[in-house]
Image (cartoon, helix red, strand yellow):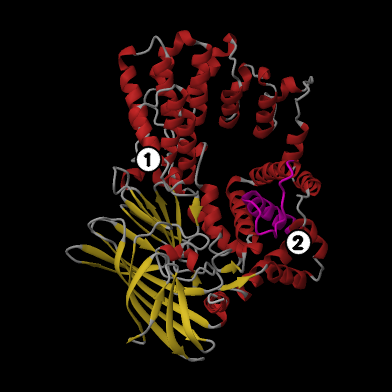
Amino acid sequence: MKKLPLLLSLVLFTLSHAQQTNIVDFKRVEAVILFNMIDVDSTVHNSYKMSFDMLRSSDSIFLDAVNMKFKNVTIDKEPVKFRNDGNKLIVYHDFEASQSYRLDFLFFNSPQKAMYFVGWENDAPNQIWTQGQGKYTSNWLPSIDDMNDKIEFDISIAAPKGYQAIANGKMKLKMTNYNYDLWEYDMLKPMSSYLVALVLGKYDKKVEFSKSGIPLEMYYYPEDSLKFEPTYRYTKRMFDFLEEEIGVPYPWQNYKQVPVHDFLYAGMENTSLTIFADTFVTDSIAFHDRNYINVNAHELAHQWFGNLVTETSGTHHWLHEGFASYYALLAEQEILGDDHFYWELYKTAEQLEAQDLAGSSTALLDPNSNSLTFYQKGAWTLVMLRDKVGDNVFRNAIKAYLKKHEFQNVTTSDFLGIVEELGDLDLTEFAYEWLRNDDFPFDSAMEFLKSKSTFIHEYIMADCEALNSKCYDYLTSDLSDQAKIKVIQQQPSLVNKQSFKNSLKVRQAIALHLYRVPLELKTEYESLLNDESYQTIEAALFHLINNFPEDTVRYLKKTKDIPGFNNKSLRMVWLVLAMTSDNFSENETESYLYELINYTDPRFGFEVRMNAFQYLHYIRSCEETCQKNLKNATKHHNWRLQKLAKQLLKENQ
């Protein structure tokens, strides 16, 4: 019974602080982040200033702050009592309603989450970058995990000399002293804490300006100058398109994009500062196989949907991801055409139908739904809503929704209510079918696609699962590339000499699916090694050596110096084929194995390391150095590499 008062006080504290947005309105944060210049794995003597208004009287306020230390805590420059419980900084004072205050302190921390120190202990690019999606920013910056609290964050960074420091907003000042450079960034508008970000690394940049005058700052590694154009291709065009299509001016001072090493995801839409995985940095050949266009457009769309207006809770997560996915598709449609737009919709409809058949579907308003539902079903919902209400009502509703709720938090009802009002209709039935029902309305989606796209109708009709007389002519007809690829997947034996006269994508399908190469097609199949597609070359090389081992030396010599993707997949295929071929450079086998083992080293990106571990496991050559690097990988911050390393170690026991 003696524990009851303490338990009761903790419950009351939790309840009162869970609703802090009703008590205090945090306005602005000015923080200076000073990195430890000796061991770059922590921040020290960070200064913090916060201005706020009290909505109600209270004896305390709090900030979320994980595993930090504090000193010199003051309110309006007067020392105050505070408590640090390891997760929160709780500040005690007689706060009065309708009064403004300023909180100051110094803080120290060594973040275990949300801020990543990459490469400082090996030869990887030396970088520091953040990823606060959800409620993780409080691991490196005292903030508010509740996304319903929007604050203006002005971040300054004291960084080692020679490094570029990048944060949200506009850089207003750079000061240099003997030990470090101080970069000061200014935001003008509020945002949720999870969208605060910084990057530190060695970069060059190019700047273009949108039609509306917004600076588009595109960063790249100095050694990747030749990859700048294919990586950022169509960026300005997509920005201009989205600003016009959405109908609301871009809401921030500038737009920056920065690639980083070993990022956790494809990209993250931090306010005015998209961080993306450097695996999307691509040359002009890799562009045909894997490029940054969709991720680029998706993260840009988030600057309106997610950043300007923000969900109140996970129940409404589709207002972020579904909208960003939809507008990314529209941007791709503008650049790549209608067939691409409808093809992407068709593919996702098939994926959503497969999810239904597997019994794992969830409603769009279920906060526990998966990415396929939030992203793709969300995009489909907007496609069908626009088709239902018409272009004018839809576009006017989007504009009204963003303007009414700018810099605020929103629910699905906020959006649908505006659509209903402008369209003078009732969306109850639509909302049930598309938002509240677990199953994806596949039949409705297919009817829509068939009615809108001759290309999709043609694709569906071109079916050769059961071989018929028409199938023999499909690959030399004027059918779409996607229909021809479908035929090759179903009946690779239909490939003949004329089939190789098709486009790059169709030729790629031949490389991927024609495993047994007839002798009469040998010359044509060899021509695939000349294509501007690393994926095509990789598949063709493997299948040619498998079918014509007597020509192994010729094929390996031809492809020896092709760079391939950033993940080194083509190079590793080449190394394995060279090591396992009896009649090619036997004296070099040891050096090839050394190179392959070398790719498991921590200085390489996680995708490179994953490929190397898998190939070495396949040829049973993961010896001492490989095993050491495999154990190292089990502690890596990237969950995909960590998971694979643990799995391979378990299999090797």
Residue 400: percent from left, percent from top: 66, 72
Residue 239: percent from left, percent from top: 52, 58
Residue 26: percent from left, percent from top: 48, 79
Magenta includes 362? yes
Three-letter code, disc 1: Asn
**Circle 2 is placed at which residue position?**
390
Q: Is residue 9 left or right of residue 466?
A: left
**Residue 632 circle label:** 1
Q: Nearer the viewer, residue 83 or 603?
A: 83
| Secondary structure at numbered mark 2 | loop
Other residues around mark 2 within 10 Å, as few (<14) / some (14–19) / many (≥20)? few
Q: Quadrant of residue 434?
A: bottom right
Region rendered in magenta: 358-387
Three-letter code, disc 2: Gly
Q: CA distance from mark 1 to mark 2?
A: 55 Å
Q: Nearer the viewer, mark 1 or mark 2?
A: 1
Magenta includes 207? no
